[in-house]
Amino acid sequence: EFLATRLLVHSLSSSLTHHSHRMRGVAAAIAGLSMMTIGFLWHSQGGRRIGRSLLSSGKTRAISFQPSARMASRSAEWRQAKSLARQLRRRNLVSYAQQQQRSPVVHHPTLGFSKPLLPSSRQQRAASFSACAAKSGSVEETTPGDEIKLQQLRTLLEDKKLDAYIVPTADPHQSEYPPNCFARREYISGFTGSAGTAVITRDNACLWTDGRYFLQADDELSSEWKLQKAGLPSTPKISEWLRDSLAPGSHVGIDPLLHTANEVAELEKVLSAKEITVVLEETNLIDGIWQERPSNPTSPLRLHADKWAGESASAKLKKLRDEIRGMGADALLVSKLDDVSWLLNIRGADIECNPVPLAYAIVEMDQVRLFVSSEKVSDVVRGKLEESKVAFYEYDKVIEGVKSVVRE
């Protein structure tokens, strides 16, 4: 009755808060007191019957619970309740997706523009759950097949003559919150936390994440995956695990755009002790199996007024060029999204809750090359930036742009 009573208390709390804001404290007190007093009823069969009844009726809400260490023993009852809780959360996502058929349009009173709100990652996952459920008719079958995705990736590993592949959370800009089109680690593992790294070999699939996400990862990862609890004394680093798990002479593939130079140097140093080579792949292997990968976001570029920025883009570029000369360099590649936004006084909405566009900039002594999707750039924005000698190129041409600058 632990699970069922919490469901009933959750419903009661929702009803109370719906009718009166003053009752929120009462509802929270009832929920907290009930959770303290009914834990010992966990092993009863009645709670599970009520829970299944609520699930079949469709009148459920998302829940989250963590029993004590004693209650969390690997008993059949615990595993069964955990599976039931996962189904309830998925049903809630399906219901959420059905309510989000249209994105609301918002108008910014100061900046003077209207646009539809970008769907959040939760909305996109909910829509995916809803579409899968509509096809299969079953909540339990809506999860994409991790085994199939891993098989497809391992086929690519064989074709590339690789023995392992590392999939970090990072995007090419080292953003803390990458847009959905770069959520490769989430796609391959099913883990939705904001931090983590997946490592796939011919025989194993592991996910490293920190203490914030141990419980979430344990819940979201399928049986194909092993959770590596980063930060614990018993958990090896990724480089150490690869060194100990792979045979001498093996090859580890990475996407060089997703790793910092220091990360690659540390990885090569540890693996070289066993003559294991780090291979820089030109294309991301996850993209090769991600059939329904979201396209790059296309929110329009907008100008950030100089009076709010405190300084014009031309003034900022002049100071930056002085720094570049002082270092004996001829150009600077700016890859961080907030740096590009600050430098050119531009803003965007390509990442949820982050006012930045997907863009690169190469600052030279006589011009700035801005790599951004042309469909985002209005005539007003283009005209303003051209005053600072900004030339526009497509977002995916940045590698060619860097090579061009080096040749010149």
Image: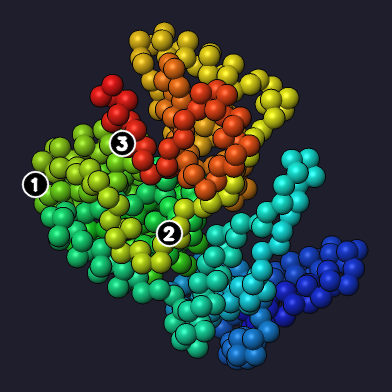
Give SS at disc 3: helix
- Furthest-top residue in this view: 326
Residue 41 at x, y = what percent?
63, 81
Horizontal arrangement in the rendering, residue 209 relative to residue 147 (left or right) = right
Q: Please say if 55 is above or below 162.
A: below
The alpha-carbon separation of the residues under discs 3 and 2 comes to: 29 Å
Q: Residue at x 52, y 32 (%)?
A: 340
Q: Residue at x 19, y 42 (%)?
A: 278
Q: Which three-letter amino acid code belongs to the residue tagged 3?
A: Glu
Identify residue for label 3: 400
How has the structure been colored for display? rainbow
Q: Residue at x 30, y 73 (%)?
A: 148
Give SS at disc 2: helix
Q: Residues within 10 Å of mark 3 (few under 14, many from 20)?
A: few
Residue 8 at x, y = what percent?
72, 80
Q: Earlier in the sequence, mark 3 or mark 1?
A: 1
Instruction: Pick whichever, 71 or 55, lies toward us.
Output: 55
Identify residue for label 1: 249
Q: Mark 3 or mark 1: which is in front? A: 3
Residue 50 visible in the current orientation: no
Answer with the quarter of the image where residue 329 lies.
top left
Horizontal arrangement in the rendering, residue 272 relative to residue 290 (left or right) = left
Residue 305 at x, y = what percent?
69, 30
Horizontal arrangement in the rendering, residue 267 relative to residue 273 (left or right) = right
Q: Please say if 113 is above or below 311.
A: below
Q: Which three-letter amino acid code belongs to the residue tagged 1?
A: Gly
Identify residue for label 2: 186
Give SS at disc 1: loop
Q: Which three-letter amino acid code belongs to the residue tagged 2?
A: Glu
